[in-house]
């Protein structure tokens, strides 16, 4: 039997790793990386591959990678993609997933962080796009506006966020509505330019374009 996304989602050990990883990031002041983020990343990664005509099983593996991609933060934020890949290998192997499928999932997880990321396969490309485009106000934990750093301001300024395909499926578009009284558009680029350029490379791997629209203006 194939290990399904539901098998992974219902695994109590994986749930614990996700929850504890998010607690560690919360203690360091990072934005939310818990179930809201990983479920969104999982669903977006799956949708990207399905929309582009990839096999349903490959899309499901992307969904699994999206759900598990941040578990390495339970070890340390530094090199969390690589430690997460090792943890995912052990967990999926014990669940009985086939080696060839594990290889695809852990390659994607190990290559999702912008410091070392690369679209090494379609699952990795979809995960990069899904992860890097999850920008939203609800990810900000700090509720004291006076103590916001630039990361808090940029995320909190995002009033609306939408990721979607062009009508002909030749481009994937991240559209944001930003409250510029909270954060200037240039602040967004200062924080997220690396992620957006990585998203463009991931899209190119999938033979599509990546576009960024902020407040109605196409900026990338």
Image (spheres, rainbow, N blue to C red):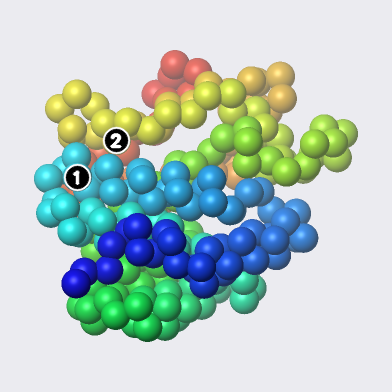
Q: Quadrant of the C terminus?
A: top left
Residue depicted at 36% across the width and 45% down the height: 43
- The vertical placement of 41 against 93, above or below, is above
Residue depicted at 12% across the width and 54% down the height: 55
Q: Mark yes or no: residue 55 visible.
A: yes
Residue depicted at 52% across the width and 48% down the height: 37
Judging depth in this view, the residue of 91 and 172 nearest the camera is 91
- What's the mark number on residue 172? 2
Q: Residue furthest top?
A: 216
Residue 110 occupies quadrant: bottom left
Q: Position of residue 76 (x, y in %)?
A: 64, 73
- The vertical placement of 103 against 156, above or below, is below
- The vertical placement of 216 against 28, above or below, is above
Q: Residues within 10 Å of mark 1 (few under 14, many from 20)?
A: some
Secondary structure category for the residue under label 1 = helix
Q: Earlier in the sequence, mark 1 or mark 2?
A: 1
Q: Which residue is mark 1?
A: 50
Q: Position of residue 126 (x, y in %)?
A: 31, 52
Residue 20 occupies quadrant: bottom right
Q: Residues within 10 Å of mark 2 (few under 14, many from 20)?
A: many
Secondary structure category for the residue under label 2 = strand
Q: Mark yes or no: residue 65 visible.
A: no
Residue 108 occupies quadrant: bottom left
Q: Position of residue 143 (x, y in %)?
A: 80, 36
For the residues marked 1 and 2, what is the alpha-carbon distance in whole angstroms? 13 Å
Relative side of 216 to 21, left or right:
left
Q: Quadrant of the N terminus?
A: bottom left
Q: Residue furthest right?
A: 146
- The vertical placement of 195 against 165, above or below, is below
């Amino acid at each position: 039997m194939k290990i399904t996304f539901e098998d992974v989602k219902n695994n109590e050990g994986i749930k614990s790793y996700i929850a504890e990883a998010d607690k560690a990031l919360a203690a360091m002041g990072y934005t939310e990386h818990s179930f809201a983020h990983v479920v969104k990343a999982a669903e977006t990664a799956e949708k990207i591959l399905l929309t582009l005509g990839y096999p349903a099983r490959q899309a499901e593996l992307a969904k699994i990678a999206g759900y598990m991609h941040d578990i390495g933060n339970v070890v340390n934020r530094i090199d969390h993609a690589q430690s997460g890949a090792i943890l995912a290998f052990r967990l999926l192997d014990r669940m009985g997933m086939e080696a060839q499928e594990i290889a695809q999932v852990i390659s994607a997880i190990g290559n999702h962080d912008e410091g070392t990321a690369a679209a090494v396969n379609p699952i990795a490309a979809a995960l990069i796009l899904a992860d890097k485009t999850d920008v939203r106000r609800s990810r900000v934990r700090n509720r004291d506006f006076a103590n916001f750093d630039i990361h808090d301001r940029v995320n909190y300024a995002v009033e609306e966020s939408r990721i979607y395909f062009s009508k002909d499926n030749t481009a994937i578009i991240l559209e944001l509505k930003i409250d510029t009284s909270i954060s200037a558009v240039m602040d967004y680029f200062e924080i997220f330019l690396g992620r957006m350029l990585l998203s463009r490379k991931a899209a190119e791997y999938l033979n599509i374009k990546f576009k960024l629209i902020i407040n109605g203006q196409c900026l990338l």
